[in-house]
Image (cartoon, coloured by chain):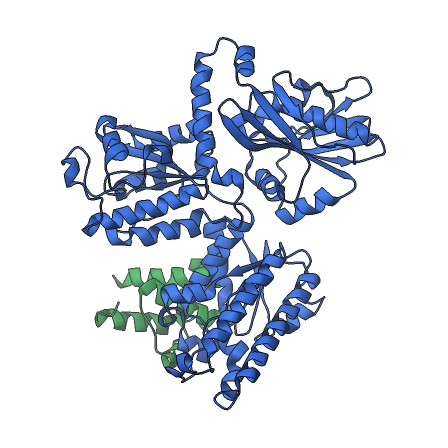
Amino acid sequence: MRAIILGTSGLDLMARPLQEAFSRLCGLSVEVAVGGYGQWQQNLLSATSDLSEPPPDMVLVVLDGEDLFGRYLEELPTSTPIAMENASNSRMEETLETLNRGLVNFPASQFVVTTVGYPSGTMLGSLEDNSYAAMHEMVDDFNRGLRRWARSSRRAHVVDALGLLLTYGSRQMRDGRFWALARCRWSREGLSLLARRVASLWNAINGNIRKCLVLDLDNTLWGGVAGEEEVSGLQIGHEGIGLAYREFQTRLKRLRSLGALLAIASKNDESLVWPIIDNHPDMVLRRSDFVAWRINWDDKAKNLQEIAAELNIGLDSLVFVDDNPAERERVRRALPEVAVPECPTEVTCLPEFAEELVWDYFNRITLSDEDLRKTEQYQARAKQLELEGKSQSVEEFLRSLKMHARLLLPDPTIQPRLAQMTQKTNQFNTTTRRYTEAEMARLAAAEDWLILASDLSDHFGDHGIVALAMVQRVSAQQWQINNFLMSCRVVGRTLEQLLLWGVAQAVWERGGTCLLAEYIPTKKNDMVRQLWGDLGFTLLQQDDDGRSVCSLDLRSKMAEPSPYIEVKLPGLTP
Amino acid sequence: MNDRLESRLLETIADILNVPNRQLKLSDGVDVMDEWDSLAHLNIILGVEETFGIRFPPKRIFQLTSIEVILAELKHLKENGRT
């Protein structure tokens, strides 16, 4: 991918750290071009330049407080409050205007803009808090305006450089030598931290987020080894070291409520562990917070594989946290797709470590109702699987579920979920095309596209929106199904049959008489290789690499809904 | 011991200049190699500081103009227990 870095100071030294961060956190190789020193406005206001061709995927704008507000430092102390406020407002307007022109001149790019830090060298001391000469307020207002601007466009995002400065400190993030020698306001550490946040944001924008955090128990969630000491000897509580574990658990519980799944992989006896998790008064995490567990004496790598299989997610969706370096190394070697971060050796650093996990693996820019119910959805599925084991026949089982579904048009409120589905679904996905929210919005409004989604509820609960079809008119009579995907947890329910029926109805109402459908093979989607054939399509062509195109003539063979799912339709006519 | 120092240094510089390790000579430096321009020089300083956990004062940065000189500096710092 391609990125350009623009800013108020010298940013040539940012190129390498950015490439390293994107490679490490996003698995992407980035070609970087840097704008001229202090030329960010000219760069954004010019529609064609070396920087805009080829169009970059990302425009990173690094703004510094000293550069934006430096001029006003000269005007203190003789300035008046009104003049200061006017100066602040006009700076904001000017900046937003430039950024908005930038959005127009770089129509294919995501914009990432840093918040601004408090300028150094004001020499105001406590006057900062005791007179109208409040640079802090000016900067806070500016950053507030920047965040408001970012909310106004799907392509605009903010990275909190000021937040980083607060966490790590100016002393660590700035280096006077590089300012003097290269007009760069950041130290090596500063550049690297900023780059990491940008890469983390990029993952969030693209829905590249891990799904499940697998946790060890002893000396990870509590101090001590269950079984080797009395329960009262374990450290979880409101005092001392136990407090650190408790705070760690509290953050993890929050993480789970934001859509991450929690699982346990611990070398222990279940009979010793559950009484602690279920009954210890100071435990924050309880059994209901976890969706899967392997508590036994087996190899942890094997346990992780089983957890992934049980949850029907890839190993590359897991993050493994264990205080034991030998276990961590074992899993890293055996399962390179699993993320295994280094854990702090000091227990009191665990709470901060939890926050770093969000940046590195679980960052997001949207939160849907589905996300909020992730744990419950997986638990419902587990119950269902249990029932499946006891069922007499598939038909009886399907009937017993009492399923109902709603077919949905791509309303703006569900577009984020639909985009997310295209990014995260790998197995039941006929073509694996990925879309961002902005792209989904565009296609939802397009005359020649039909986007239809379906949710699903059953006996056990509401699964949320779980299936999506994206269909494009390719000629007066023919519509092509460019994307057909479904969440793994509802495979085998005949929902695909229902969705196809909905698509066929909608296409027919728009004057279409023929459906085309593609299959593009990947390592993960073999389960849908025969989908179109199974749904009644005829094979038109098959390539050597496994790609195929099929067709369904709606005049001779209309699709049928599913006999097991009660359906509610939106108005399907355009 | 010093061989390790040299090989770590060469590895760091080769990575930053994006050239194969074995292509580097001790006499390579700012005026000698095309790839080693002023931006690369600062990146190399940053890289060496990171790899060896040290910090050069600003005046020194522009004196460390070749691999030979940087290596001598590292050996000197090592002897004085600074790295």
Locate the C terminus of chain A by quadrant: top right
B12 with respect to A268 (left or right): right
Determine the residue positioned at 50% across, 27% down.
A461
Chain represented in green: B
Residue at the limit of the structure toward the bottom, as seen here = A78
Q: Is residue B25 visible?
A: no
Determine the residue positioned at 35% across, 68% down.
B49
A221 with respect to B22 (left or right): left
A403 or A202, which lies in front? Answer: A403
* Image-quadrant location for residue B24: bottom left
Q: Is residue A170 visible?
A: yes
* Chain A on-screen colour: blue
Against A189, residue A441 (above or below) is above
A349 with respect to A414 (left or right): left
A420 with respect to B21 (left or right): right
Against A57, residue A427 (above or below) is above
A108 or A392, which lies in front? Answer: A392
Count of numbered circles on the image: 0
- Estimate the x, y position of residue A518 in percent, counting from the top left: 69, 30
- Estimate the x, y position of residue A39 in percent, counting from the top left: 61, 74
* Image-quadrant location for residue A86: bottom right
- Estimate the x, y position of residue A367 in percent, counting from the top left: 52, 45
Determine the residue positioned at 59% across, 75% down.
A89
Residue at the limit of the structure toward the top, as seen here = A392
* Image-quadrant location for residue B22: bottom left
Determine the residue positioned at 52% across, 9% down.
A393
- Estimate the x, y position of residue A416 in percent, counting from the top left: 60, 44
